[in-house]
Image (cartoon, coloured by chain):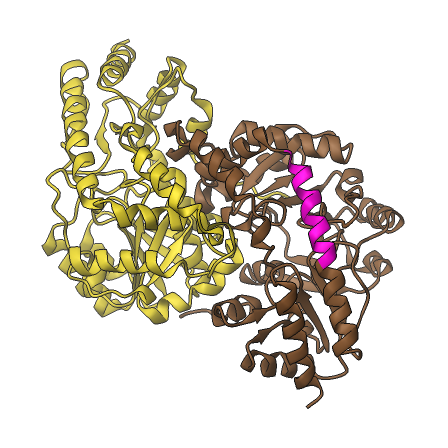
Chain colours: A yellow, B brown
Amino acid sequence: MYKKNKRSYIREILDATDENTISFAGGLPDKEFFPLLELSKASKKVFKNANCLQYTKSQGIESLREKIAKIYTEKFDFPTTKDDILITTGSQQAFDIILKSLDCNEIIVEKPSYIGALGAFKVLDKKINGFNKIAELNDLLNKKNILYTISDYQNPSTKTYSNKKREKISKILDKKESILIEDGAYCFLNFKNKVKDPISKSYRNSFHLGSFSKIVAPGLRLGWIRASKENISSLLFAKESLDLHTSTFNQMLIDEYLNSNDLFKHINKINKEYFKKMNFMSMCFKKYISSFSFKKPKGGMFIYGSFNEDSMLLAKEALKENIAFVPGEVFYIDEKSNEARFNFTNTSCKDIEKGIKTLASIVNK
Amino acid sequence: MYKKNKRSYIREILDATDENTISFAGGLPDKEFFPLLELSKASKKVFKNANCLQYTKSQGIESLREKIAKIYTEKFDFPTTKDDILITTGSQQAFDIILKSLDCNEIIVEKPSYIGALGAFKVLDKKINGFNKIAELNDLLNKKNILYTISDYQNPSTKTYSNKKREKISKILDKKESILIEDGAYCFLNFKNKVKDPISKSYRNSFHLGSFSKIVAPGLRLGWIRASKENISSLLFAKESLDLHTSTFNQMLIDEYLNSNDLFKHINKINKEYFKKMNFMSMCFKKYISSFSFKKPKGGMFIYGSFNEDSMLLAKEALKENIAFVPGEVFYIDEKSNEARFNFTNTSCKDIEKGIKTLASIVNK
């Protein structure tokens, strides 16, 4: 009677690892940069108001939605009001909410794509189709399906669409009238603190997903959907049937944090540190496993490349030596691959070197 | 392209009300009894550990699962370990997780039933069938469907199954091999602090849902599912695809709260206060709207009864006068009803009297 759904390899790895594992597997931010003190201070204020523990509205608390709207208006010159924002329990929840609200059975995704999105599509029995080149979208998209993209520092490929490519995608969308789900989880994580306009800005029938997980802290499970007011209101039934609303306390906590802290100053700090770690990991690969082929990313939290060896086998061997990384094939719908994803944000430089050295000894066995 | 799903009347009322509304509509606990100070104190400890802001395991943090397991073992003499518990983002989320993990298309519910459950079933396009009397389950249940019950202080009817009825249901389940989802949201809210054994204790293929919303605070969105270890592991794929995991911070916060506070002492206090409010509301009904027919509940947060008038019309008229309650028909799948549900926990005695007096003037117009 139980459906046979395979769990995400990444979540399984996370469950299998312990404090002795050097993990390059998850998309975990560096906890050294969590604004622990600032949030702790904010919580003191929040706890003065008993409403922080009460039920609240399904769409989310207004002042937080206003602040998120302001980010779109100011950072992307993308006019947005609080009515265009729905607060979600992590960006992950957005997939489920949107798919349940639409009468769509097919999703077109990049090859490779984010494993959490693939899982959310699968659990709702959606058909998933992939594309390599943008031109393929001309054949793949239609009025009845959805395009899912991660425009910035794609997970796992680390690629970012140029403005030209964004324009090209938006033109195809215009012609085909598909719905766009654009995942902006990493859009602020550019090592030079630059941002690119989301495709959603030039295509109305779109949902832009945002998250505090990578820029503040994932443990609060706070994300959002940005869409037109009408499209947002079409989502409320699915949202309320899922968890009534996202934690009131967590919403008020981030809201209060944003009242007294400069979010983008904090993001700039993270980007600076992540840039250093990315460079260090690159250097280690070149030094110890020169056969691992990759391009340095311009932002985000991962290095993605390919081995000459079977990366799935390699990942399994590595796990035995307490090293975790993600073999590329789990990011494909049904394809073999010797690619692999390495997270550089959640490990100290010392452990990055130790981990890659150990991995090198397995590769060279 | 958008599905046409009607939002829950209750969530719509909650969205429509403001600080001037006297609301008997939601299932909101009395915020006066939220352990604000205790949680604030706990948060100080939690914020000392940066892991509170990091991603965590999909099943939930171990020490909280252990504590919940202990409640089953000690309060119900129902042997339970941490492996039998999955932490959910509010009890509401449990419906979605369980239904997505099972190959079942029909749910059998009490008439009337909890509107949030009905919504969660509808959004997944499940067929819903209702029953009035337990004997009907002999015809309705089969190997391929699910029985959903709220055994204690049912929402909205406020009824509790006697031990004899629980036995009867469990015997039918044994014979028919259906799956049981037993909602225990109110199971500790007995005015005399007594608990009854859940049906799940005597039927293995069951999911017992629990929640901190009514006994600590709903704003944290923390609930759980209790099932056999094997059944719990069948749920993990759906859980992780929904929101990866429930907020780490909120789990650690409740865990720390439970370390230094006596939960059942707190629950006893709530029950004592709720009993007073229930009696006061009963008295007001008898005094001002004697035609409203109801039985005093033995626990929970509602008075449920029936009017001689059309309760849907009455609710709409009342809302114009800033009084909110829920007309009974929204708790039925497809049936008219003049019943109505009144929450007594979220309103001061002064406002309870004022609200019912105003309602009386509408009834007597």
Q: Number of marks in the image?
A: 0
Q: Residue at x 16, y 22 (%)?
A: A280
Q: Which residues are magenta?
A: B262-276
Is B268 contained in the magenta span? yes
- Residue under the point 39% across and 27% down: B48
Residue B100 place in picture, x, y as percent: 56, 49
Quadrant, the C terminus of chain B = bottom right
Rendering coords of residue A179 (x, y %):
31, 63
The quarter holding residue A135 reads: bottom left
- The residue shown at (14%, 32%) is A296
Question: In this orientation, does residue A271 appear?
Answer: yes
A21 relative to B346 in the view: left or right? left
Q: Image check: A325 left or right of B273? A: left
Instruction: Looking at the picture, tell me which residue is in the foreground, B225 or B196.
Output: B196
Quick one: which residue is furthest to the front in this view? B350
Q: Is residue A362 magenta?
A: no
| Vertical order, A127 against B360 (above or below) | above
* A67 sits to left or right of B208: left
Q: Indicate the quadrant where residue A323 lies.
A: top left
Whether residue B84 sits left or right of residue A202 in the image: it is: right
Residue closer to the observer: B142 or A209? A209
**Extreme residue toward the bottom, this view:** B365
Camera sees residue A290: no
Q: Nearer the viewer, residue A300 or A334?
A: A300
- State which quarter of the image contains the N terminus of chain B: bottom left
Give the prevailing secondary structure in the magenta stretch.
Answer: helix
Instruction: Tell me residue B213's x, y (percent).
Output: 58, 48
Vertical order, B111 against B85 (above or below)? below
Locate residue A74, reporting x and y percent: 17, 58
Tell me which residue sits at (51%, 40%) in the image.
Answer: B37
